[in-house]
Image: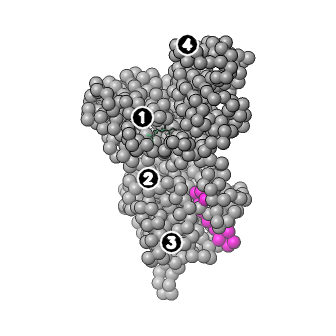
Amino acid sequence: MCGIIGYLGGQEATPILMDSLKRLEYRGYDSAGVAVLETPRPGSLIRTSVTKSEAKVDDLITKLKAGMPSGHLGIGHTRWATHGKPTYINAHPHTDCKGQIYVVHNGIIENFAELRRELQAKGHEFTSETDTEVVPHLIEAYYKGDFLAAVRAALKRLNGAYAMAMFSTEDPDLLVGARLNAPLVVGLGDDEYYIASDITAIIPYTKRVLVLGEGEVAAVTPLGAEVSTLDGTTVKPKLVHVDWDVSQAQKGGYPHFMLKEIHEAPEAVANAMRGRLTDDGVVSFREFSPADEDLARLREVLLLGMGTSRHAAVLGELAIEDWAGIHARAVDAAEFRYRRPTFGRDALAVVITQSGETADTLAGMRLAKDREALTVAVTNVFASSAARDADGAIYLHSGPEIGVASTKTYLAHVVSLYLLAMRLATAHGRVSLERKQELVASLRELPDQVRGILEREKEIASLAHKYSRYRSFLYTGRGFGFPVALEGALKLKEISYIHAEGVSGGELKHGPIAMLDKNFPVVAICTAGATSEKMVNSVHEIVARDAPVLALVTEGDTSLDGVATDLFTIPRTEEAAAAILNSVVLQLFAYHVAVELGQNVDQPRNLAKSVTVE
Ligand code: F6R
């Protein structure tokens, strides 16, 4: 996500903001900006200096140095575009009609479109395409002489996720921070205060940090920082002493970006659904909104991707076929681009690419466009090539992924494809309301269930410790468990360099079983589903060949007790939702095996984050 910094204290704010924004660069961003409340010269009015750049922080710094604003209160932001292109106008801070209120924001305001309409009807004028801009206008609408009260009233109207820093020229000694579903901390210096989305931003300045809770607001003045709820009830915030260096802080205290990103899975899963799904399974995507009739005429869905994204595509294929009843096929984009196409205008090509820049996937999309298929990119990067060139885009909203191996974005891809499957199911008049409600309920449970898995990391680490001595693995599953097996094997091989293959449970007997012996373990996805009994049979066959088995099973299922060598249980849920939970287990397993072996998990040899060549 974006980066936020705010400062209030005795020093000049601008150099601190510039320095902090530099330190937030590692998160990835497309534009940056600062607003500084200038110390008024004798006889002149208080004013705010705003400087923005649609390029890098260095460009912003060059602009700031040319006319350094002098003041003791300011906010800064690095933007990772979500709503609106990465342009100068869309860069933060955003302001109200009178230019008195300044806001920087991370996250997604789900109901911004209706708020914008409401405010426009009252005469507010908007200049950007962002969701953020509704915030200063909403505060302006509620302002009756008390900035903090207006902020609280405005925040109560917002749905979604936010971390914000803001100030008003009307209250020049007050810096306000607020958060909901996005992190924000207040750094305590000596008579000076910082607000930051990421401890990295403030690490050289202070080690004492207040961690804001959900729905809390921090009011920072020269006298101190007070934290309260949206209703104004004072709360005692958690004071933490952070003894990290910059590299540790960037990783949020985790030893690797990959582990940090696996731990961001609950938010990634929630963000992929945020504002897009009702309890009755009505799905809407802001940047992909064909009419029901246009979706109803589709006869085929092609899901194009490479590597991990192709595995997400296979899960999408299963959901689309099962829920929407449309012929769907997940394809290796590199192969697809050289095949003789048979599809045409009644096909939807779903282009699955986290980076939005994978050369083979883009080439596959071009072929689909040549055949006049409808195209939609499912991507994490706003205005990436895939997003620009496709007819529509479904953004993952996962925030930047720095570890080379995809983890949280894979989960967000899968959730997005499930939503797309529901959207298609509605257009095709498939799936009863009750069934949709069941599916939605299981998707909504996922963030908490993923949290539950992450809390059991030690259990997974100890399994990884036990299995890390083997040099070859087979991963197997059926139905929604099969792509999970493919992805589990890929994750293990790419970061630990151990040979691992994913095969379907049915395929096992047709060749791969020949390899099995006591030195060739199998990871078997046996969680509840249409074919789980078949998987239990497969495990018996594997065990009969003396191969150690690590089985993923559903809580309460005892069919493999005393059969599999090791069991890891996951909560009972829909088969499609279990694919997410099982994948998180296998991501952590691969991570801990690689760490046991001392590998460079964040930058595995021979791999690049974005493969922009064929
Ligand atoms: C594996 C991994 C790769 C990518 C693949 C496609 O962890 O990250 O297999 O999934 O290179 O990348 P995107 O999704 O950017 O098109």
First of labels 1, 3 by sequence position? 3
Dot 4 falls on a residue whose secondary structure is: helix
Q: Is residue 476 magenta?
A: no
Is residue 305 left or right of 246 when viewed as pictured? left
Mark 4 crowdedness (10 Å alpha carbons): few <14, some 14-19, many ≥20? few
CB under 8 Å between callouts 4 and 2? no
CB under 8 Å between callouts 4 and 1? no
Q: Nearer the viewer, mark 1 or mark 2?
A: 1
Q: Which mark is residue 36?
A: 3
First of labels 4, 2 by sequence position? 2
Q: Which residue was labeled with disc 4?
A: 509
Q: Amino acid at mark 4?
A: Lys
Q: Amino acid at mark 3?
A: Val
Residue 206: % across, % down: 67, 65
Q: Which residue was labeled with disc 1?
A: 305
Identify the magenta region.
189-200
First of labels 3, 4 by sequence position? 3
Q: Nearer the viewer, mark 1 or mark 3?
A: 1
